[in-house]
Image (tube, rainbow, N blue to C red):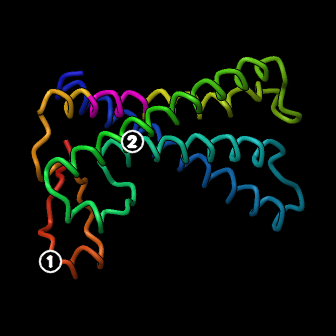
Amino acid sequence: MSGRSSGLFLRAVENVLIVGFAAMIALVFGNVVMRYVFNSGIIAAEEVSRMIFVWLTFGGAYLVARENGHLGMNSLVIRLGQRGRWICRFLTEALSLLCMVLVAIGCWEQTRMNLANAAPVTGLPTGLVYAAGLACGVGLASINIRNLFLLVTGRISFDDLVPQIETEEMLSANVPRQDNPRS
């Protein structure tokens, strides 16, 4: 994906997650108000908000991974030389790719099996919940494949071999902060 289309895709994912979060808040808050004020409720609110929450969780995981924002144990790796960092990064990306392939396969099977099962209140296919894991697994696997390609072709600099997240531990180790501006 080119830089511009990648940026547009990320903005679209962010906007979908924002709309989903707003809808979930409106459903839950509306349901609480209806229950306490009018002694009734929005019947589908719990079910739909639960489905949205699953999609928000997996979508957020994708966005954070795209920006190298997940927490990591870098205290040892930042003290290694180039070869050690390269090996650790390669193993991290390869093992993560393996995990994401397994997640995608498992979620595909669950999605397929549960498309015929309807949620009790809304009647929506329960496979939609598992489809969130499938989308996330495929998305994170694509990030891993891209990073492995960049790593093997030598397009990742020495400083970028260890994703930098500013933490108290890194600040105490005098590791310089590396800004990761959003595209």
Quadrant of the rendered image containing residue 153: top left
Start-end of magenta stretch: 141-148
The x and y percentages for residue 62 are 43, 41
Judged from the image, the secondary structure of the residue bearing numbered disc 1 is loop
Which residue position is annotated with label 1?
A: 174
Point out which mark residue 4 bears.
none
Residue drawn at 24 percent across, 26 percent down = 149
Q: Amino acid at mark 1?
A: Asn
Secondary structure mostly seen in the magenta stretch: helix
Q: CA distance from mark 1 to mark 2?
A: 33 Å
State left or right for residue 182 relative to residue 94.
left
Which residue position is annotated with label 2?
A: 14
Q: Was residue 124 drawn as part of the magenta stretch in this picture?
A: no
The x and y percentages for residue 148 are 28, 31
Quadrant showing the N terminus = top left
Of badges 1 and 2, nearer the viewer stands 1
State left or right for residue 13 relative to residue 5.
right
The single residue placed furthest to the bottom in the displayed view is 172
Residue drawn at 36 percent across, 33 percent down = 144
Query: In terms of sequence position, does the residue under pointer 1 or pointer 2 come before the other?
Result: 2
Judged from the image, the secondary structure of the residue bearing numbered disc 2 is helix
State left or right for residue 25 relative to residue 61.
right
State left or right for residue 9 relative to residue 80.
right
The x and y percentages for residue 161 are 20, 48
Q: Amino acid at mark 2?
A: Glu
Q: Was residue 144 drawn as part of the magenta stretch in this picture?
A: yes
Q: Nearer the viewer, residue 114 or 163?
A: 163
Residue drawn at 75 percent across, 63 percent down = 33
